[in-house]
Image (cartoon, rainbow, N blue to C red):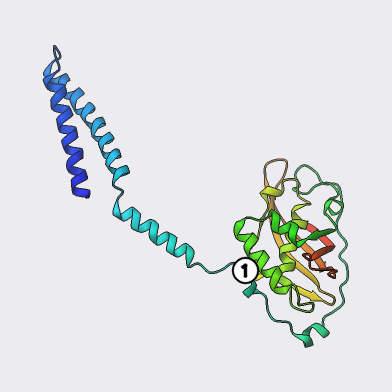
Amino acid sequence: MEFLRFLAFVAAWGFMWRWVVKNRGSWHLFYGNLVGAAGGFIVAMVVLSITLSLFPSAHHYEAKQTENVVTREAEPTSLLPEAESAANPAALKAAPVFAAIEPDDKPSPPDSALLPNYASRAPKTLSVQTVIDQSDDQGRKALTALSKKLRNDAQGDKSMLAYVMCSPFVTSTLRFPASARFADSKSIAPQRFKDQVYTFSNTVTARNMNGDDVTYRFDCSVQEQPRVDATPAEWHLLALKLQKSDS
């Protein structure tokens, strides 16, 4: 197919070149060949584009197929239910009691990515269903499966679900939430307390009013609220503190 495409390119170029030279009229032979070469090349490129669209290259097709296969075989994200560990009664019994973190709740200058008095901006409670509705298709499926798996496990380790619930609390304190980029969560070691309380430390980078990206270290503590029926669980924000990573 590549050879036939090359022949079509050369043939179109030569035919158009010859046609222009034969029909040059009063033009000098030199100018006729010059215009014929340029015009023939343009026509040959058009023919090449048409053949590429009608008969795609086998190399590009196979590369695309390989890319799709690799994407399908990629490892599942950490949001999938398999990422949650089984509950350890002994570890749960020995878990410490949570102590609240005092936020650094001060006015925020334009070079900060945080809203003024950011701690008071964050909602106090969020439903898992609200976060599911705001997620993309892949995140929605993973979070729904994770929530269903842990729904009837009152003492299970819900650290991954708790971290997912921390994210919207953090972004609610930012001037431009859409610019938020969280560091990789795979290396996070969550701290678990009694009564389904979890604390996380990680970094988030967001845009400030000057158009610069600023990185913050945040500490987020959340607690799952007791269920009263079959509705999705709600998580309460206990403490949230953000500080520039270089300070």
Q: Name, please, the residue furthest toward the top.
A: 26
- Residue 212 screen position, x and y as percent: 67, 45
Q: Quadrant of residue 14?
A: top left
Q: Residues within 10 Å of mark 1 (few under 14, many from 20)?
A: few
Quadrant (top left/top right/bottom left/bottom right) for the C terminus:
bottom right
Q: Is residue 124 above or below residue 223?
A: above
Left/right of residue 43 with respect to residue 221 in the rendered view: left
Tell me: residue 166, above or below residue 13.
Answer: below
Q: For the residue labelled by badge 1, is the local secondary structure a helix, a strand or a loop?
A: loop
Most extreme residue toward the bottom is 90
Q: Is residue 57 left or right of residue 231?
A: left
Q: Along the line of sight, which residue is nearer the eye, 220 or 103?
A: 220
Could one spot residue 244 in this view of the protein? Answer: no
Tag 1 residue = 78
Q: Position of residue 103 (x, y in %)?
A: 86, 59
Report whether residue 61 is seen: yes
Splitting the image into 4 quarters, where does residue 130 fall?
bottom right
Q: Nearer the viewer, residue 14 or 234?
A: 234
Q: In the rendered image, which quarter is residue 77 located in?
A: bottom right
Residue 163 image point, x, y percent: 72, 66
8 or 173, which lies in front?
8
Residue at 85% of width from left, 75% of height from top?
Answer: 195
- Residue 173 vertical position relative to residue 161 in the rendered view, above or below: above
- Residue toward you, 32 or 52: 52
Q: Residue at x 64, y 72 (%)?
A: 81
Q: In x, y percent, where is residue 50?
A: 29, 39
Q: Residue at x 31, y 48 (%)?
A: 56
What number of labels is visible? 1
The kind of residue tagged 1 is Ser
Q: Residue at x 23, y 26 (%)?
A: 39
